[in-house]
């Protein structure tokens, strides 16, 4: 319930049993000014609404499929191992589960608490994680790109006609599981590397628009002087260069050093400073307030002063964009730092806390949401629903590097948004690989090995 307040509605025609101690546990968190506190209060409101539908002890209907919710206060005398503390809420929940099972009711414990599921196994009780908001494991998540094969004749015809396309019916792909050739199952806006079946050096890049594979329009551009160094960055540049009307949402996943933040800033500055007429008023940058190490205490000052330490990566990337990544003399370094600061002083670039984005309606913003693997699905949904007309949202992060203590690679907001927006005409996605890390030889090696 703390993870997903509406979880009680996710079990279709089953009977959902809530031990009374769960209500007491929810009550402990209701005063918190956090996602956990908000979930606790929402859960309480749900139970209060259901209370008006009948007797919660006897059971009230949940849905049209026949689902029922009831509160359980019995089974106080059900035996547990003698060394288990009966006053612990977890043990009370397990006691209710065992009591129901002993009465002949097929019972499954559903909990996000790993240790509780282990203890349920000790009691020979079936236990499952709550999977309704879980997405596939990292290796099975949607990447937004694929590799397919076509004849050299089809590729030649594709290159010859800038406005033409390739019929998906002539494409094939290799299935690593069956080790055979099959027709590809393409998603809308999926990027493709098209290889020739009879010439290893003959290939093309394209995007599936829902009907055919079409050309990339921006692969030869150099926004803010940046040149893509690999196929992943070519795909990423295509997503970013498209207008907010065509591609209002871009999601980029990948290891550190693949230039996700760097590219998002480069194209954003190009759109705000170089392109005329200007498409966006400001570059707005937000990120979850989750540190990599232990907290060092409360930060003093205004909102801007509090979030500045979390935005140092942004300044690092801006410095590289302005300097060309070449060694500079001390005086030049000072001038570059002043130029970067000027972007903030003139409000070309704004940095704000993610916590204060709810309720906003953003018009013509270039909005970068960095490190979103540390956001919850609820937070991701909240920010994706903020844009008004002309706003472009870019979600960035690495699902394998999560610092949030209650999230993992399958429950974070970045992966959740990626899977749920898969196949949308308004969403473009690219997952970059370890081989596409361009930060340094050490970063590339570490991304691959660690």
Image: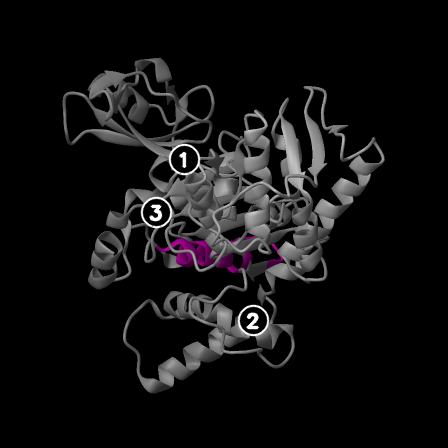
Q: Which residue is mark 3?
A: 233
Dot 2 alpha-carbon crowd within 10 angstroms: few under 14, some 14 to 19, many 20 or more: many
Q: Earlier in the sequence, mark 3 or mark 1?
A: 1
The part of the image, by quadrant, that contains residue 331 is bottom left
**Relative depth, front residue between 137 and 37:** 37
How many angstroms separate mark 2 from mark 3 (CA)?
A: 29 Å
Residue 372 position (above or below residue 385) = below
Q: Which residue is mark 2?
A: 307
The image's mark for residue 142 is 1
The boundaries of the magenta stretch are: 259-282
The part of the image, by quadrant, that contains residue 236 is top left
The image's mark for residue 119 is none
Q: What secondary structure is the magenta-colored segment mainly?
A: helix
Labels 3, 1: front one: 1
Dot 3 alpha-carbon crowd within 10 angstroms: few under 14, some 14 to 19, many 20 or more: many
Dot 1 alpha-carbon crowd within 10 angstroms: few under 14, some 14 to 19, many 20 or more: many
């Amino acid at each position: 319930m703390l993870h997903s307040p509406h979880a009680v509605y996710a079990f279709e025609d089953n009977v959902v049993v809530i031990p009374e101690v769960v209500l007491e546990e929810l009550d402990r968190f209701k005063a918190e000014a956090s996602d956990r506190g908000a979930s606790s209060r929402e859960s309480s409101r749900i139970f209060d609404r259901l209370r008006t539908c009948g007797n919660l002890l006897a059971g009230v209907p949940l849905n049209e499929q026949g689902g029922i919710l009831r509160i359980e206060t019995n089974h106080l005398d059900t035996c547990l191992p003698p060394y288990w503390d009966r006053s612990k809420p977890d043990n009370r929940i397990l006691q209710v589960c065992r009591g129901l099972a002993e009465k002949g009711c097929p019972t499954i414990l559903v909990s996000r608490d790993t240790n509780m599921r282990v203890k349920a196994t000790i009691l020979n009780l079936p236990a499952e994680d709550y999977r309704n908001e879980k997405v596939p494991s990292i290796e099975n998540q949607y990447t937004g790109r694929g590799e397919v094969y076509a004849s050299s004749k089809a590729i030649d015809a594709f290159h010859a006609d800038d406005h033409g396309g390739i019929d998906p019916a002539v494409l094939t792909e290799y299935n690593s599981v069956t080790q055979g050739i099959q027709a590809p199952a393409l998603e809308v806006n999926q990027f493709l590397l098209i290889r020739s079946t009879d010439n290893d050096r003959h290939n093309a890049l394209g995007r599936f628009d829902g009907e055919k594979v079409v050309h990339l329009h921006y692969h030869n551009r150099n926004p803010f002087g940046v040149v893509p160094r690999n196929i992943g960055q070519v795909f990423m540049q295509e997503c970013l260069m498209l207008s907010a009307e065509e591609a209002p949402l871009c999601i980029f996943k990948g290891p550190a050093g693949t230039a996700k933040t760097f590219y998002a800033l480069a194209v954003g500055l190009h759109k705000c400073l170089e392109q005329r007429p200007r498409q966006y008023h400001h570059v707005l940058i937000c990120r979850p307030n989750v540190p990599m190490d232990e907290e060092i205490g409360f930060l003093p000052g205004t909102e801007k002063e509090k979030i500045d330490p979390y935005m140092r990566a942004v300044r690092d990337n801006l410095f590289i964009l302005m300097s060309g990544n070449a060694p500079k003399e001390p005086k030049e370094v000072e001038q570059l730092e002043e130029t970067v600061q000027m972007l903030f002083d003139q409000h070309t670039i704004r940095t704000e806390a993610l916590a204060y984005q709810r309720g906003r309606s953003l018009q013509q913003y270039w909005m970068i949401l960095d490190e979103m693997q540390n956001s919850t699905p609820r937070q991701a949904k909240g920010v994706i629903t903020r844009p008004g007309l002309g706003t472009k949202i870019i979600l960035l992060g690495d699902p394998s590097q999560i610092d949030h203590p209650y999230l993992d690679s399958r429950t974070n907001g970045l992966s959740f948004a990626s899977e749920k927006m898969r196949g949308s005409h308004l969403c473009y996605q690219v997952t970059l690989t370890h081989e596409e890390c361009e930060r340094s030889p050490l970063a590339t090696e570490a991304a691959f090995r660690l």
